[in-house]
Image (tube, grey):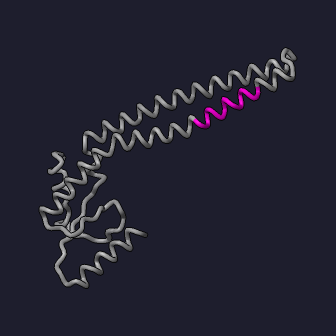
């Protein structure tokens, strides 16, 4: 909705000023899927996530094993009520640590994603800006934003941005 409003305002401004504006559009998803660094970043991020998830799964498994053992001792009557309560409290603390770890994982994933993709997006944005300036475009729309209802194919700058990024597809 916000993009639609911005597009409407931009087009209204262009019409009101009476100046001939030059517009273009681009398929950013198509370009980003062809950039080798994106594939490498995807792979690195997935490996990082797998590593973090493995640690979390190990923590959960350890907690489950301790809980099972504690319940077994309780059922067999080999643990005093005070010792049971003490160990149950420790297990609750471990559960809280696991919850905290899950939150840390989400923050670490966001940080890693930013670290991996920011240089790629910066490079992409520079190429897009260069193509727009070189061709005198006032606005370039993303066809993936689902705001563009119609555009003449001659306004498609996807190939030019790919060329600027050194992508041959």
Q: Estimate the x, y position of residue 50 in percent, counting from the top left.
A: 46, 31
Task: Report the predominant secondary structure element of the magenta stretch.
Answer: helix
Q: Estimate the x, y position of residue 47 in percent, counting from the top left.
A: 41, 31
Is 58 left, or right, of 68 in this rendering? left
| Residue positioned 31% across, 36% down in the render | 40
| Residue positioned 21% across, 57% down in the render | 128
Asked if the magenta segment contains residue 96, the reply would be: yes
| Residue positioned 62% across, 32% down in the render | 97
Q: Which residues are magenta?
A: 88-100
| Residue positioned 24% across, 68% down in the render | 139
Residue 160 occupies quadrant: bottom left
Is 155 left, or right, of 97 in this rendering? left
User: How many numbered marks have been drawn onto this rendered protein structure?
Assistant: 0
Asked if the magenta segment contains residue 123, the reply would be: no
Q: Front-most of 37 and 30?
A: 37
Question: Is residue 169 positioned above or below 105 on the image?
Answer: below
Q: Estimate the x, y position of residue 75 in percent, counting from the top left.
A: 85, 21
Q: Front-most of 131 and 119?
A: 119
Q: Front-most of 39 and 80?
A: 80
Which quarter of the rendered picture does the N terminus lie within? bottom left
Residue 158 occupies quadrant: bottom left
């Amino acid at each position: 909705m916000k993009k639609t409003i911005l597009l409407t305002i931009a087009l209204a401004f262009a019409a009101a000023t009476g100046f001939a504006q030059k517009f273009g559009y681009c398929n950013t998803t198509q370009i980003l899927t062809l950039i080798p660094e994106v594939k490498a970043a995807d792979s690195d991020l997935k490996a990082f996530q797998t590593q973090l998830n493995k640690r979390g799964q190990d923590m959960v498994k350890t907690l489950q094993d301790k809980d099972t053992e504690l319940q077994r001792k309780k059922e067999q009557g080999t643990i005093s009520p005070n010792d049971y309560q003490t160990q149950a409290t420790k297990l609750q603390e471990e559960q809280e640590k696991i919850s905290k770890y899950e939150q840390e994982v989400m923050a670490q994933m966001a940080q890693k994603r930013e670290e991996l993709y920011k240089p790629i997006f910066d490079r992409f944005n520079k190429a897009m800006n260069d193509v727009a300036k070189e061709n005198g475009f006032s606005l370039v729309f993303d066809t993936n934003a689902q705001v563009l209802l119609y555009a003449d194919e001659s306004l498609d700058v996807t190939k030019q941005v790919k060329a600027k990024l050194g992508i041959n597809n």
